[in-house]
Image (cartoon, rainbow, N blue to C red):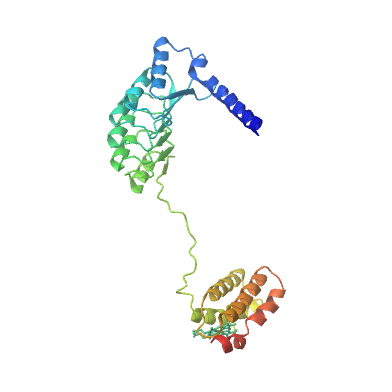
Amino acid sequence: MKSLLGLIVLLMVGVGVVVAAESVEKVDLKLTDAQQAAVDKVKEGGGMVLRVASNTTALDVAFHLSDKKNTDGTIAHLKAVPNVTKLNLAGTDVTDAGLAHIAGLKTITHLHLERTNIGDAGLAHLKGLENLEYLNLYGTKVTDQGLNHLKGLKKLKKLYLWQSKATKAGGQGLAKAIPGLYVNTGWEKPKVVEPPKTAEVTFKVIMEKGHKGDGSLLAKTLTKKASKDEIKALLGYYEALAKMKPKKGPANSWKAKTGALVAAIKLVDKGDQKGFVALKKASDCKACHSVHK
Ligand code: HEC
């Protein structure tokens, strides 16, 4: 067991080495001394600086795993770092004023600002980031007013506004100004299939629609004239009936009778011929009424 753990640790170290090989100091980016000094400052401030891919000089700068303070002061050095395309400031203490430091970084395509204190004033500094494709503002203080600053970012494809102060209408307004923009507001509620309301499914409804007369669901089912939907509706009625309490008669009798109805209609629903025989027997009006009605 111990040797297996050792192997896993060795493998993890191995992966670590591969990742480190992508790190800027290990590869020849032909950085000037000033640029290398700026990269070092960013790292000291808690930023990870990595190449986006080994065949490009584009850099990914990420602070979201850092617990260092004064992100504003650190990102001031990004001006001297070439070709920053991705910047992740999620969950940092970056401020509206601090974003002025990245206002000129036109190479940025992806910017994470989620869960920060950024508001509308900060967005004003993003106006010039003309290559921005992805912007995450989830859990920030930005409002619809601030979104106006983004109208000129024609390459923007994805904008996340969940749990910000912006409204759905505000997001839609921006999507109109930027063709092809997807705005995630997080307000779309998942569709829930409502179970039938028990208040509506009374004995009266079940007996009249389900049992009474030639047009009833039961009569149609037994004469094989019922559609799939009608069979399903009768199944729904019987399942509801099984949960209801009759005014008269012992509980175990009710359980057995309604259970037989549910089992029979399920067989019918599956196309099993035995279901019809079972349903005819289980739906005996008198047998049930004499005990429970
Ligand atoms: C599993 C038991 C059961 C079966 C089978 C059953 N019923 Fe009923 N039925 C009841 C009960 C219980 C009531 C009384 C409901 C109440 O207390 O309001 C009732 C009531 C009724 C009522 C009166 C509804 C009202 O409140 O106005 C009609 C009509 C009716 N049944 C028709 C039928 C017919 C027709 C059949 C046979 C095809 C049938 N039932 C089979 C249990 C059953």
Q: Residue at x 42, y 51 (%)?
A: 188
Q: Residue 205 location, x and y as percent?
A: 50, 79
Q: Can residue 55 be seen in this view?
A: no
Q: In this view, does 212 lie above or below 22?
A: below
- The foreground one among 219 and 99 is 99
Specify the quadrant that holds the N terminus.
top right
Q: Is residue 53 above or below residue 26?
A: below
Q: Which residue is drawn at 62% across and 32% down?
A: 5
Number of callouts in the render?
0
| Side of 167 relative to 48 (left or right) | left
- The foreground one among 121 and 224 is 121
- The foreground one among 180 and 110 is 110
| Side of 159 relative to 247 (left or right) | left
Farthest right residue? 273
Farthest top residue? 33
Q: Residue 151 location, x and y as percent?
A: 34, 36
Q: Is residue 48 visible?
A: yes
Q: Residue at x 52, y 82 (%)?
A: 246
Q: Residue 73's quadrant in the figure?
A: top left
Ligand 1 quadrant in view: bottom right
Q: Residue at x 27, y 34 (%)?
A: 121
Q: Residue 141's quadrant in the figure?
A: top left
